[in-house]
Image: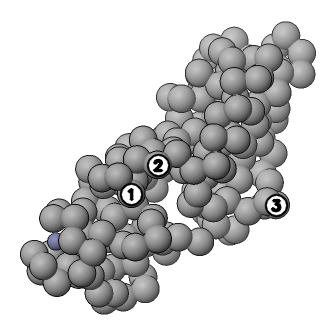
Amino acid sequence: MQHISLVTPEYAARRATRANSDCPALWSILDSVFDPELPYVTIWDLGILVDVEQTTQHSCKVTVSPTYSGCPAVDVISDDIKAALMKEGMQSVTVEVSLSPAWHTDLMSPDAKHALHNQGIAPPAQVVHCPQCDSGDVDVISQFGSTACKALYRCNSCLEPFDYFKDF
Ligand SMILES: [Zn+2]
């Protein structure tokens, strides 16, 4: 699974932003917020969570970048972020949606790619591999899988169909 364990430079940069933040506790609270369409991947691991700033003792601003523009999940994500932070004592939470720079699959953590793999979804990669048998001998069946973010593939080695999380 070498191809999904790599830390991309983009993810390393996100980790540095988080490590240098003056409100690490708020980032930790947001580790409990999952993507509504991929409920086994946190918004941090997916790369949607861009920044967290504490503005006063009881207020903060969270910046998110949705996985694609017009993603209907962004309202749910925004509500989940507010609920998680307010439960821990924040009184005012502003969620800002940033479309630029656009979300990109290189922002995902290796954990997110492993989580997709464990769900039978091939994570984004230069070469698509079958999540069942790891073969690189695969064909696209449809550009649209179970959601707009995924494409449907079939493995020519084990003949199993699988979803591929598209590289944007
Ligand atoms: Zn296979």
* Badge 1 element: helix
* CB atoms of marks 3 and 2 within 8 Å: no
Expressed as whole percent of the image width and height from the top left, the position of residue 149 reads 49, 70
Cβ atoms under marks 2 and 1 closer than 8 Å? yes
Q: Which residue lies furthest to the right in this view?
A: 56
Q: Is residue 146 visible?
A: no
> Splitting the image into 4 quarters, where does residue 145 fall?
bottom left
Q: Name the residue under label 3.
A: 100
Ligand 1 shown in quarter: bottom left
Check disc 2 and give the amino acid type. Leu
- Please state which amino acid type lies under the numbered disc 1: His
Q: Which label sits on residue 159?
A: none
Residue at the front extreme, as displayed: 2
Q: Residue at x 30, y 52 (%)?
A: 1
Q: Where is residue 49 in the image (x, y as percent from the top left)?
A: 66, 42
- Residue with the mark numbered 2: 6
Residue at left offset 69%, top offset 24%: 19
Q: Position of residue 12 (x, y in %)?
A: 63, 40
The tag earlier along the polypeptide, 3 or 1, is 1
Determine crowd level at label 2: few under 14, some 14-19, many 20+ residues with C-alpha closer than 10 A: few
Q: Reading the chain from its start, which is encountered first: label 3 or label 2?
A: 2
Q: In this view, does 34 lie to the left or right of 5?
A: right
For disc 1, the neighbor class at 10 Å (few under 14, some 14 to 19, many from 20) is: some
Give the x, y percent position of residue 11. Answer: 61, 45
Q: How far apart are marks 3 and 1 (CA)?
A: 27 Å
Residue at disc 3, secondary structure:
loop
What residue type is disc 3 on?
Ser
Query: In the figure, is residue 31 to the left or right of 165?
Result: right
Q: What residue would you read off at disc 1?
A: 3
Color theme of the render: one colour
Res. 71 visible in picture: yes
